[in-house]
Image (cartoon, rainbow, N blue to C red):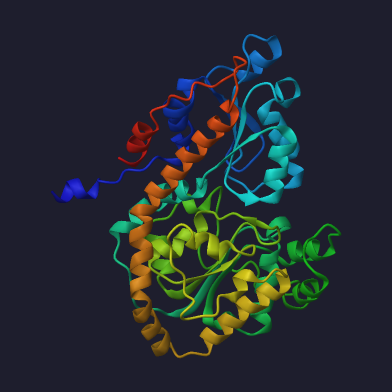
Amino acid sequence: MVIKRFFKYPVISVENFYHVLYDNLLRPINFRVRYYYPFGTCQNLINIGVDSTHEYLFGIAAPLVLFHYDQEPIYAEDASAIDLGLLLVRAKGKYPQLLANSEHSDLKKKICRDNGFLDWYFFYHGFAALDWYRDAKYFANQQQIKHVFLSFNHLVTDKRSYRMSLLARILEKRLESCGMISFHGTPISCRHEIDSKSSAVSSHSRSLISRYLVDRTDLPMIADNASIDGAASARFGHEELTVRHQALFHLINETVFYDNKLHLTEKIFQPIVVGRPFMLAAAPGNLEYLRSYGFKTFGDFIDESYDQEQDPDRRMDLIVDQLQMLCDQSISRLQDMLTEMQPILDHNKNHFFGQFREMITRELLENFDRCLRIWNNGRVDGREIDSHLDLQGVRRLLIS
């Protein structure tokens, strides 16, 4: 009986996620699937099913194309990569082209509207987290804390340059001794960022980075892993859990901070599976976005109004103010706080390994069905999609 319970909730691996969707959802209605590989890049276009490039060039069949651009947020400069993935030139408007994505944003809506893409949103990174963190449910949470907070930063330039600004503010307040900090940047990379004319970092933040980072001799700071290749979250086991148990609040520095979009990655689920509270450095509204999936946050213990602050610098200041407040507490008080938070922490972990998976699976299928209904609505020109899919059967398969 114990073994049965142990293996009750298998999950789809990230490596096979697109192929599972293709076999059970897309191949039955003759869609071709395309995605970029390696993950998180725009290097190589991979086809699943019939070679849609060959069909497009030689006119063997009309391409019904679904393109996965769901691992990374969408930026204006990504439009050409999306165009290539969906074979726009001749098929535009003639046949359904679905853009699978993992964000809510005005930019995404505009790209879909301008190009006639059907918008298939689902929480890709939720599925990735369920795969990568699946073993965390079997480890006991450690209640003894040594540090007030942790802040782990792998990539710190370009779209993620706000992490430099955030660390500079932490150093300005002299809070580094309270935390576990990883920062994989160097004085040279910090200098290049603040000298770049295209940097999103404000003039005030540039001055802080110049003052507190470019002349430091202890960069990079390493508290987690010195050599990380690819998706660091994919290797999340006993050692990673042990490190993360040492701190109370986890400052999660998300991929998107400057751009106005709702987009979360697997990073936000690390403190949840570890049984720790968190603050979220992300674009405005993403804490509320997380709550919309049934998770609880910590507004009874800290001021979470930073989530609604539109100005990036001010949002960072509000976050660091909360770190300062926590660092002013004694370890015994923080230990008591952890105990008081336990009902929320238990709820979040149980929800992640329970209802959350069914929620995002149902959302994925309902939004896919919505795309087909939009395309088929009133259509009698022979280009209708056979939408008689057994969606409930697919749902049972994905959550079985």
Position above or below: 9 against 277: above
Q: Position of residue 102 (x, y in %)?
A: 57, 46
Relative side of 188 to 363, left or right: right
Kindly tell me whether residue 217 is visible in this rendering: no
Quarter of the figure with residue 396: top left
Compare residues 277 and 397 and report the one nearer the observer: 397
Q: Where in the figure is residue 114, as x and y percent of width and height?
A: 75, 37
Quarter-wise, where is residue 61 in the image?
top right
126 over 85 or under it: above or below: below
The residue under the point 66% across, 33% down is 117
Q: Residue furthest left?
A: 1
Q: Quadrant of the C terminus?
A: top left
- Specify whether residue 343 is in view: yes
Residue 9 appears left or right of 380: left
What residue is drawn where x is 52% and y is 44%? 122
Residue 58, percent across and down? 69, 9
Please tell me in which quadrant of the rendered image residue 118 appears. top right
Q: Is residue 7 left or right of residue 379?
A: left
Placement of 330 over or under 50, stated as above or below: below
Total numbered labels placed on residues in the image: 0
Q: Residue at x 79, y 74 (%)?
A: 210
Residue reaching furthest to the front: 378
Residue 209 image point, x, y percent: 75, 73
